[in-house]
Image (spheres, helix red, strand yellow):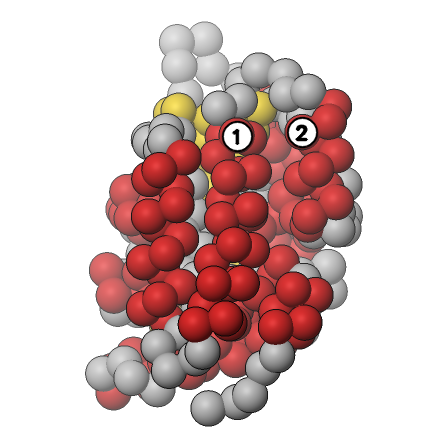
Amino acid sequence: MKKITLEEIKNMPYVDFLAFIKEVNRPPGGKDSVRRMALNSFINFKSSVLHSGCNTGYCSFEMAHLTKCKTKAIDVNRNMVAAANEKLKSEPVQYKKNMSFEVGDAHKLRFKDNSFDLVFSGGSTAFMRDPSRVVKEYKRVCKPYGFVGDMCMFYKSDPSPDLIKKINDLLKIEIKPWKKDYWVSLYEKEGLELYYDYTADMPHDPTSKEVERYCQQMVKEVLKGYSNDIIEVAIKKFYGYMSLFNENHKYIAYSVLLFRKDEFKEQVSLFGK
């Protein structure tokens, strides 16, 4: 077991801390969102899929388990990719053969044009430096008439500037109180056709006691063998993150969006698509 100090945990950035405790970082809507994306993009065991901003691989594994597709997944954070690859070691041989995780930047994908039947993000596009450039890359590597998908959160009502500042200070990025129209237009500006849209409120509004119990259970299960001091500091740190997100979620809804990469612009329609 790699030794770690209390100070290292206290100073650990958010993303590295999630990798350390192996938090799977489910997308908004969880399994239901992944299932909706899998069903409505029509992928199967012959399909090739790219998961961008994979974190520790939750959506990658779930998509592969559901469809048996060939999956490549990337993330800029080496610790996240290492955690995903560690989990991959325990998967059945079929998935070991058909899945790969690597360090990669969605702003400049290494893959050739027209490589994937589905390119998707479990909500990570919102945390990238230049989302418009990233969407261009998604479109480039997507096959003709393939799909580009996102499970994106958006603000259904305006949070306080102080809350936005706390979120940005934590994540070291510049989140703005984007509404759903922002995300739809980001993809449509690239000529992608909105093909499927499922929108809902966040499915659960946990109490502070529920957040506390979750953090304790999560950390204690993952950090078995570590000292009590390490475990307590990790729980406190994790609780601070989850409490902030829980407050933020009161202003948030989410969408499962799928856009098709059409080769020709369709004629306008009067009575529906």
What residue do we see at 67% from left, 56% from top? 137
Q: Which residue occupies the foreground of this view, 256 or 143?
A: 256
Under mark 1, the amino acid is Glu
From the image, tell me which residue sits under label 2.
163
Q: CA distance from mark 2 to mark 1?
A: 8 Å
- On the image, the x and y values in percent for residue 98 come to 35, 79
Under mark 2, the amino acid is Leu
Question: Mark number for residue 189?
Answer: none
Which quadrant of the rendered structure holds the C terminus?
A: top left
- Answer left or right for 35 relative to 191: left
Q: Which residue occupies the foreground of this view, 196 or 272?
A: 196
In the displayed structure, would residue 36 be above or below residue 80? Answer: above
- On the image, the x and y values in percent for residue 123 come to 53, 46
Q: Which residue occupies the foreground of this view, 16 or 140?
A: 16
From the image, tell me which residue sits under label 1.
247
- On the image, the x and y values in percent for residue 68 come to 26, 68
